[in-house]
Image (tube, rainbow, N blue to C red):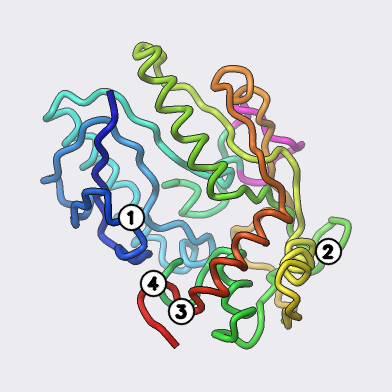
Amino acid sequence: MYNQLAISSSSSSSSSSSYYESLKILEADVQHANSLFDTAIHFAGLKAVGESVGNPRRYFDNNLVGTINLYETMAKYNCKMMVFSSSATVYGQPEKIPCMEDFELKAMNPFGRTKDPKGIPNNLMPYIQQVAVGRLLELNVYGHDYPTKDGSAVRDYIHVMDLADGHIAALRKLFADPKIGCTAYNLGTGQGTSVLEMVAAFEKASGKKIPIKLCPRRSGDATGVYASTEKAEKELGWKAKYGVDEMCRDQWNWANNNPWGYQKKL
């Protein structure tokens, strides 16, 4: 059974106060092989494409060395089951979309090769959120000349609740079939949304105008990446319930009530 949950986190990219008080929190770092794990769900601690290109050693050290230490700790305590959470970044610039689980892995940046943030966010939704609440003046849109319908890059954006449910579904699959081996599942909506489409959706949800600044493409960014979720739907019994409009609505509701996150009040 997995009715007890402990979180091991270095809090380098998030605030520990964002965790529910009912959870047992272990303040640790996976780079230090001294934490006790039962069944593990491993999320890469560093995940910004642009930063990974500028500071690749930090990404290899944190994401690879940290993962190796986690494996060694799991082996020490005879823990053999893990859900390893990655990103569609590992598919690089695919020859066709949607991406299938058997596609060749050809990451374009150090994060892809390894797998409410503090400071300036590197993910689109938190970035838009901080502009909407007035913490940042404008949103940098990296790349406006891609061969897409509006020139901005296309990705598959997924609601955090759908993502959480997908990881739990994968965990249940492990318990149901411990000998499943190493199997990949894509989690997403199965539909691509451009950066500018996401901006428009957030403006609609918030009623706020999001000032943007069109910037050159970043090294390591692909034109468009989104994945097929047919395998997850069939084998995990999981499917995304929410779309972009619901994501923006819920993100704005949270941001409007917590403009400075959990750490600071206006």
Q: Secondary structure at mark 2?
A: loop
- For the residue marked with disc 1, what is the amino acid? Tyr
Q: Residue at x 66, y 39 (%)?
A: 241
Residue 262's disc is: 4
Mark 3 against mark 2, which lies toward the viewer? 3
Q: Residue at x 61, y 45 (%)?
A: 92
- Residue 94 is a magenta residue: yes
Cβ atoms at labels 1 and 2 below 8 Å apart? no
Choose the circle earlier in sequence order: 1 or 3: 1
Q: Secondary structure at mark 1?
A: loop
Mark 1 against mark 3, which lies toward the viewer? 1
- For the residue marked with disc 4, what is the amino acid? Tyr
| Residue 70 image point, x, y percent | 23, 40
- For the residue marked with disc 2, what is the amino acid? Gly
The residue segment tinted magenta is: 92-104
**Camera-side residue of 208 and 68:** 208
Q: Residue at label 3?
A: 260
- The alpha-carbon separation of the residues under discs 3 and 2 comes to 32 Å
Q: Residues within 10 Å of mark 2 (few under 14, many from 20)?
A: some
Q: Residue at label 1?
A: 20
Residue 248's disc is: none
Q: Residues within 10 Å of mark 4 (few under 14, many from 20)?
A: some
Q: Residue at label 2?
A: 151
- The alpha-carbon separation of the residues under discs 1 and 4 comes to 12 Å
Q: Residue at x 58, y 22 (%)?
A: 237
| Quadrant, the C terminus | bottom left
- The alpha-carbon separation of the residues under discs 4 and 2 comes to 35 Å
- Residue 172 is a magenta residue: no
